[in-house]
Image (cartoon, rainbow, N blue to C red):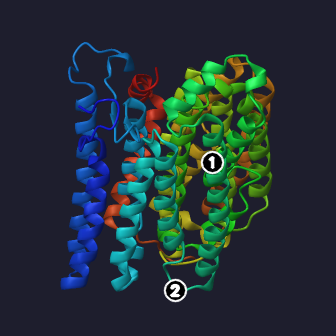
């Protein structure tokens, strides 16, 4: 077990090692032997399985005696590499989310990987490398490690957005994502520099200790603190697509190859929310009065803007993009509340939301084509007659995104809104509730087109892997909507 300080712990980076090793092997094997894609599938599956095994090893390391331990108080966190990497129940929870999205996203992207031919190995390697970066993000205990993880993940996504040369919209999406993402990263890095100037430390624990030591000494809390926190948060609000930092999302989701969009949208969101929660409750816990009100304002703007713009879209991927803006707002409702209860609600929300989002994009990719840019709503007219299985699955996923009872989406919204109401943000809950009701308009619109409109679309062929992954997501979505206790108990362990 790692010790506080400059300790070296292989266990702390096992999942990252497994994913990076898998990416290297995929590229080396492809260059050397140019094998069938089934060999790459085996390597990728082994890599992801190795990452999952690494998470299990980390869990056993921080819980050496798993019997009789109730809650996270029984955990022994790993502080490794001069506190740059912190492995505790919270980080393992979000790491598991990243690994799960990597597995699901790879399955849904496989048709695209096959269509890319020799470039398929590059796409697969980029997925594994991106996930390794996001794993570092959610377990960072140092702002430089946070930045490195952010950039490794983000740069890989920029390339994936433009990896298909079949449509010029793909290149346009990649360029927009890269330029705006680079600006967001620069803003984040400037905020980190200002924070270091004020505190003299870049570790989460050191920043928290410095801020708490100031107490109410206003004279020693100059404007550099709110400026630094604001710039850092802006960088992450961009990653989750919160308004007004959302302009990139609709164009990127519409222009990027359909097969990879689900992975791109889901993995970035779960990693960014995990990082935001850790920053809010560790380094910035002494500045709640600085970030709470602005985050509440961004949450309100996001749910309103996302809902209003989604209603008028004629492309399903743009609808899902603006829906993502609204969901980012719902997540920020919980973050802005700033309580442990709201953090639990946010964790449940993001973990259940991202798998539904990835599956929805997976079906969209199957309908529109794995390498396509754009998914017009007209393509879904009469889909229930030509492809009843795809239509039924997409309908359940739309209802889950809307927050219909008996789905995980309802439980997620209920938990976040309840915590926010108890935390004194009644006005924000009312805004979010109105937006949630209005959002049914565009979710039900898709269902109406599939079941009550005539169309002559071709039958959608779902691969075996896509069918299995979709079935697993549907079972989890409905199962956690009916009986969410197992995941809620796991989340309770993650937050003190």
Task: Please report the residue visible at 68 percent of the width from the left and 24 percent of the height from the top.
Answer: 420
Q: Is residue 87 above or below residue 41?
A: above
In front of the other: 347 or 465: 347
Mark 2, residue position: 165
Asked if residue 244 lies left or right of residue 370, the reply is right
Q: Is residue 219 above or below residue 353?
A: above
Dots 1 and 2: beta carbons under 8 Å?
A: no
Q: Is residue 290 above or below residue 354?
A: above
Where does residue 359 sit, x and y in percent of width and height?
47, 56
Distance of label 1 from label 2 (alpha carbons): 38 Å
Where does residue 50 sit, x and y in percent of width and height?
23, 52
Q: Can you tell which quarter of the image residue 311 is in?
A: bottom right
Where does residue 333 sit, x and y in percent of width and height?
68, 33
Task: Please report the residue visible at 68 percent of the width from the left and 59 percent of the height from the top.
Answer: 319
Give the class, few, some or many, for how many residues have Cα within 10 Å of label 1's Cα (few <14, many ≥20).
Answer: some
Considering the numbered disc 1 on the image, is that residue within a helix, a strand or a loop? helix
Mark 1, residue position: 193
Nearer the observer: mark 1 or 2; the answer is 1
Give the class, few, some or many, for how many residues have Cα within 10 Å of label 2's Cα (few <14, many ≥20).
Answer: few
In front of the other: 290 or 218: 218
Q: Can you tell which quarter of the image residue 90 is in?
A: top left
Asked if residue 368 lies left or right of residue 152, the reply is right
Task: Please report the residue visible at 73 percent of the width from the left and 62 percent of the height from the top.
Answer: 247
Q: Is residue 455 visible?
A: no
Q: Earlier in the sequence, mark 1 or mark 2?
A: 2
In front of the other: 238 or 325: 238
Which quarter of the image is occupied by the N terminus?
Answer: top left
Where does residue 158 sit, x and y in percent of width and height?
54, 69
Considering the numbered disc 2 on the image, is that residue within a helix, a strand or a loop? loop
């Amino acid at each position: 077990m790692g010790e506080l300080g400059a300790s070296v712990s292989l266990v702390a980076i096992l999942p990252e090692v497994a994913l990076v090793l898998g990416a290297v092997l995929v590229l080396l094997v492809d260059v050397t032997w140019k094998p069938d894609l089934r060999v790459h599938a085996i390597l990728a599956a082994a890599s992801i399985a190795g990452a999952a095994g690494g998470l299990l090893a980390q869990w056993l390391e921080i819980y050496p005696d798993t019997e009789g331990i109730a809650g996270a108080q029984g955990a022994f966190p790993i502080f490794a590499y001069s506190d740059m990497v912190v492995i505790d129940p919270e980080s393992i929870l979000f790491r598991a989310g990243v690994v799960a999205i990597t597995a699901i996203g790879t399955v849904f992207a496989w048709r695209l990987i096959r269509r890319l031919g020799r470039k398929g190995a590059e796409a697969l390697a980029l997925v594994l490398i991106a996930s390794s970066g996001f794993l570092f993000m959610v377990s960072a205990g140092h702002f430089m490690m946070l930045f490195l993880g952010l950039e490794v993940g983000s740069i890989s996504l920029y390339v994936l957005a433009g990896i298909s040369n079949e449509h010029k919209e793909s290149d346009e999406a990649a360029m927009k994502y890269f330029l705006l993402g680079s600006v967001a990263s620069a803003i984040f890095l400037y905020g980190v520099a200002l924070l270091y100037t004020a505190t003299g430390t870049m570790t989460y624990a050191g920043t928290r200790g410095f801020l708490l030591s100031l107490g109410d000494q206003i004279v020693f809390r100059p404007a550099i603190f709110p400026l630094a926190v604001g710039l850092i948060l802006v960088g992450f609000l961009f990653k989750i697509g919160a308004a007004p930092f959302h302009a990139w999302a609709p164009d990127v989701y519409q222009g990027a190859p359909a097969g990879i969009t689900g992975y791109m949208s889901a993995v970035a969101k779960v990693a960014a929310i995990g990082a935001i929660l850790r920053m809010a409750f560790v380094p910035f816990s002494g500045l709640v009065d600085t970030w709470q009100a602005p985050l509440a304002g961004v949450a309100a703007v996001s749910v309103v803007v996302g809902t209003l713009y989604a209603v008028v879209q004629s492309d399903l991927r743009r609808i899902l993009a603006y829906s993502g803006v609204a969901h980012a707002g719902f997540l920020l409702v919980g973050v802005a509340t700033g309580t442990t209860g709201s953090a639990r609600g946010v964790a449940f929300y993001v973990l259940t939301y991202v798998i539904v989002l990835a599956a929805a994009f997976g079906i969209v990719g199957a309908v529109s084509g794995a390498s396509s840019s754009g998914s017009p709503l007209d393509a879904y007219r009469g889909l229930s007659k030509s492809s009843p299985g795809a239509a039924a699955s997409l309908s359940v996923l739309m209802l889950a995104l809307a927050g219909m009872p008996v789905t995980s989406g309802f439980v997620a919204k209920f938990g976040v809104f309840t915590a926010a109401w108890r935390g004194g943000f009644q006005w924000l809950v009312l805004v979010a509730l109105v937006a949630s009701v209005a959002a049914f308009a565009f979710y039900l619109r898709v269902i109406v087109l599939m079941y009550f409109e005539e169309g002559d679309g071709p039958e959608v062929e779902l691969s075996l892997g896509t069918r299995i992954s979709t079935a697993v997501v549907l079972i989890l979505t409905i199962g956690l909507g009916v009986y969410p206790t197992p995941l809620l108990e796991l989340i309770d362990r993650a937050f003190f």
